[in-house]
Amino acid sequence: MNLEPLLSHWQAVLTAIVVCVTLVMLLVGRRAPDMVMIGGVVVLLAAGVLTPEEALKGMSNEGMLTVAALFVVAASIERTGALAALVDRALGRPESLASAQLRTMVAPAALSAFMNNTPVVALMVPAIRDWAKKNRLSVSKLLMPMNAAVVLGGLCTLIGTSTNIVVSGLVSAKRGHGLGMFDITWLGIPLLLAGLVYLLFASKYLLKDRRPAMSQTDDPRQYSLEMLVEPGSPLVGRNIEEAGLRGLDGLFLMEIDRDGHVIAAVAPTERLETGDRLVFVGIVDSVVELQKIRGLRPATDQVFKLDNERSERVLVEAVVSNTCPLVGRTIREGRFRSTYDAVVIAVARNGERLQIKIGDIALEPGDTLLVEASPAFLERQRSSRHFYLVSEVRGSTPPRHDQAWIACTALAAMVLAATLELVPMVAASLFAAAIVISMRCISSNEARRSIEWESLLLIAASFGLARALDKTGLAEGIAQSTIAVAGDHPHLVLAAIYFVAMLFTELMSNNAAAVLVFPIAWQTASDLGVNPMPFVMAVTVAASCGFATPMGYQTNLMIYGPGGYKFSDYVRFGGPLNLLVMALTVALAPLIWPFH
């Protein structure tokens, strides 16, 4: 098809320019990605290419709402501590980065073959983030390979992705019956195995470490903290290594006080007993992680004398001022809990190890206190002259372990309902989110904070651009022109079909790309007089495998913020993977489903 008549249409020309400029700005990365995408949609809206309804339709899109709800459900699993123990046992302690990557790819990929990719990624992101921190690994080296493995795993069965089901429906409309449960498996498994090999080797060279320049171990504040092994704790009988208390990043187990007998040099094989007082020295981020371990609690009994529940409290750092009335008095003498309705659980003083119990520490100006209190403490003390600085430690609220079964049940019910197609995925995820909030697995404020709003805005804006490509005829013109260049050779035409579907997947939703390219692929196969199945499979794979942009697949956007990625990371790492999957699909599909 000749593109000249199409490009003479000013709306198509403007859309092409806006899309190109948007992609360039995303690649350069000097502006916030969501603002760049929204800017492109606003230009098309102002020019009249898009109506207000079309520009804003992405805000109510099922995919965006599903992702938002899944962020909340995943946060509730993390908040209740339901996933931490399971992940620690399943992933263990890796000996190398490659070992860690393999552990975080294989199980999620296998799981994604039998459930939707999106909840798998939503569940794994917070778990891998915490696990990476504990094992001193870069989360940016783990999340993108995991996400790619999950997408490839979804190609192994019919129910692995919604795109597979959409294409099956399109095939059914053409020939009376759709794809079988394991029809795509013959192609999906080789793609997954080849993809895992690529992910392991390419991540070493093509993925950048996106950790901040100052790591958490550079924190100058070293807190002294005592933790008690509770009766009935799952840690009782386990050694220090098994309990995950050895090698914690930025935290050191100084000694164990066992019934007055002090074990100063704690061996990794030392087994924990009920009532052990563990003395740690470490930075605040590591202290927060320590608080989340089930079966450990601060050694001071004062935390149980506060009025509100522990699950509603936060950790606060407060620097003692020279006008604080408690200066020169011990924490116990000054009745800190009664005075401030808060409990000191750790103290940092110029990096020195304080050899006395918390209650016996005499406060000095400049001491940094780690305080457990209700959020109201922050409001009361921010303007107080008793403290120089008062700030909440993010993510420090103790886990709601007693609510873990509710969060897990909600997640399992959501996955089961969506997999069996009892209700749409969006309905299942929204209902699960409502359950975990109403049952107080997670507070409404925590639910709002758990949502990656930048990712949602990217998803919503991408639908606006995709609509402009479709509405102006630019997408169809590009598709037909690309296929025409391939001529009459089936393999070349198959490659062209795949390339077009892959290109559209990177610019619009995967299902929209499949629906747009499928009729062209089917008609092309009919015109060539060949078996349409290789073309069907090419569209199916290409519509799911968009690794080169954050918009290529909705799970790509879910790892964008948590991984600290830039647009260029997707292009550099995902681009070659796109080409590898394309080459294998074009080579294998005609062997599995011959043209004649």
Image (tube, rainbow, N blue to C red):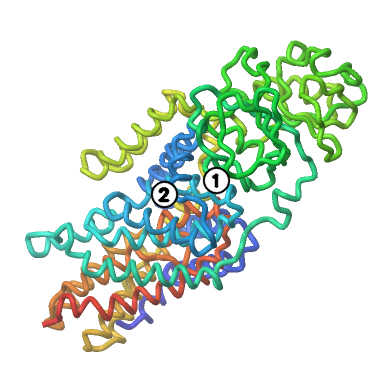
- In this view, the residue farthest toward the front is 261
Residue occupying image coordinates x 58% and y 56%: 137
The front one of 76 and 483 is 76
Q: Look at the image and tell me in which quarter the N terminus lies.
A: bottom left
Q: Is residue 527 above or below residue 298?
A: below
| Residue 130, numbered label | 1
Residue 86: x %, y % from top left: 43, 41
Image quadrant assignment for residue 504: bottom left
Q: Which mark is residue 393?
A: none
Residue 410 screen position, x and y as percent? 35, 32
Using a 10 Å C-alpha cutoff, classify the residue at mark 2 as few (fewer than 14 neighbours), some (14 to 19) or many (20 or more).
many
Point 40% across, 33% down: residue: 433
Tell me residue 187's x, y (percent): 24, 70
Residue 229 visible at all: yes
584 or 538, nearer to the observer = 584
Residue at horizontal 61 percent and vertical 68 percent from the top: 28
Regarding residue 465, the answer to whether it shows in the image is no
Question: Which residue in the protein does label 2 denote?
Answer: 58
